[in-house]
Image (cartoon, rainbow, N blue to C red):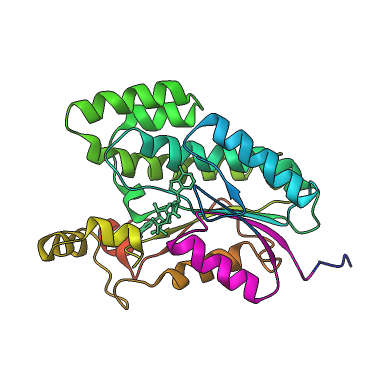
Amino acid sequence: MTSIPVRRRVVVTGVASGIGRALAEMLRAQGDDVIGVDLKDADVCVDLGTAEGRQDAVRAVLERSGGVLDAVIACAGISARVPAVIAVNYFGVTELLQGLRPALARAEAPRAAFVGSIVGTRPGAQNVVAACLAGDEHAALAAAAVLAEAGEGGALYPASKAALARWVRHTSVTDAWAGAGIPLNAVAPGVVLTPMHAAIAVTEEQRRIVAQAVPMPLNGHAEPEVIARALRWLTSAENSHVTGQVLYVDGGAEAVLRGPDHT
Ligand code: NAI
């Protein structure tokens, strides 16, 4: 039997706020060595919305970790109606995970996960999604800019999460991930009470619209720790066989919105 290190070396992006922060606190409390990545207030301060920022992040993380990582968990994201949402939420996740994959492959029980969203179930901006999945950031941002200029920037955040939900399915089962023994999954929340939510649900009317769009019959809106706990399990050594999944931690929103006949 192989021995699994107790103190794991884990990268968490978006560590300065919300879900990433809650997760990092939880992991540090159980003795893990967390390398936090964010725009500021982190071990590695970079902009994951740019190719250079992602390369800097990979370089800095590899230096700090000695080239071996037990888990990478991408929580950084923005909610906005601008093309940058594609750069940060999609390429900031997929390129970072791919850049750090070789370091994961060197660990005994490597795991990876990221944060999706219930809105990834909403169809739309298919040309943006297709460009993302083709790995063409230039084309994805150009298509996103056309939508934003046409006043349809609201489709971009769901598109970034829909693309991630598809990416995880085909990437997770490849030789590079499953073949290297690395489970790769997403946790998709409904509404989580973080600064991101507070910024988009300022007025009573906005809060009503959000609650209507994301019905959560089980226990209502979630604290960030709820999402962090699911990410912690998916990236723990205990998870040997779950991969390619989008785990909806959403108080039932996905079941309500897609209905009982969706399988
Ligand atoms: P948050 O705003 O509290 O935290 C996001 C963190 O990401 C911040 O620390 C921010 O500085 C960092 N970040 C943003 N852009 C970055 C960049 N370019 N480079 C590096 N770091 C960057 O938000 P929250 O709620 O914790 O969101 C975390 C993830 O959860 C995001 O992917 C978000 O889309 C997702 N999510 C959140 C929901 C919610 O209701 N709060 C619902 C569904 C998904």
Q: Of all residues shown, which one is farthest toward the left? A: 205
| Residue 262 picture quarter | bottom left
Q: Which residue is drawn at 52% across and 43% down?
A: 93
Nearest the eye: 42 or 186: 42
Q: Does the magenta stretch include residue 256?
A: no
- Asked whether the viewer can see residue 10, the reply is yes
Magenta residues span 6-34
User: Residue 75: horizontal and vertical position, in percent?
Assistant: 49, 54
User: Residue 32: horizontal and vertical position, in percent?
Assistant: 70, 68
User: Residue 36: horizontal and vertical position, in percent?
Assistant: 60, 56
Q: Of all residues shown, which one is farthest toward the front? A: 41
- Asked whether the viewer can see residue 180, the reply is no
Where does the C terminus fall, quadrant-wise? bottom left
Q: Is residue 156 above or below residue 69?
A: above
Q: Of all residues shown, which one is farthest toward the right? A: 1
Q: Count the marks.
A: 0
Q: Which residue is drawn at 20% across and 58% down?
A: 213
Q: Is residue 15 magenta?
A: yes
Q: Of all residues shown, which one is farthest toward the bottom? A: 219
Q: Which residue is drawn at 39% across and 72% down?
A: 223
Q: Is residue 164 above or below residue 145?
A: below
Q: In this view, does 143 lie above or below 28?
A: above
User: Residue 65: horizontal and vertical position, in percent?
Assistant: 76, 51
Where does the N terminus fall, quadrant-wise? bottom right
Left or right of 52 on screen, residue 82: left
Q: Residue at x 60, y 68 (%)?
A: 233
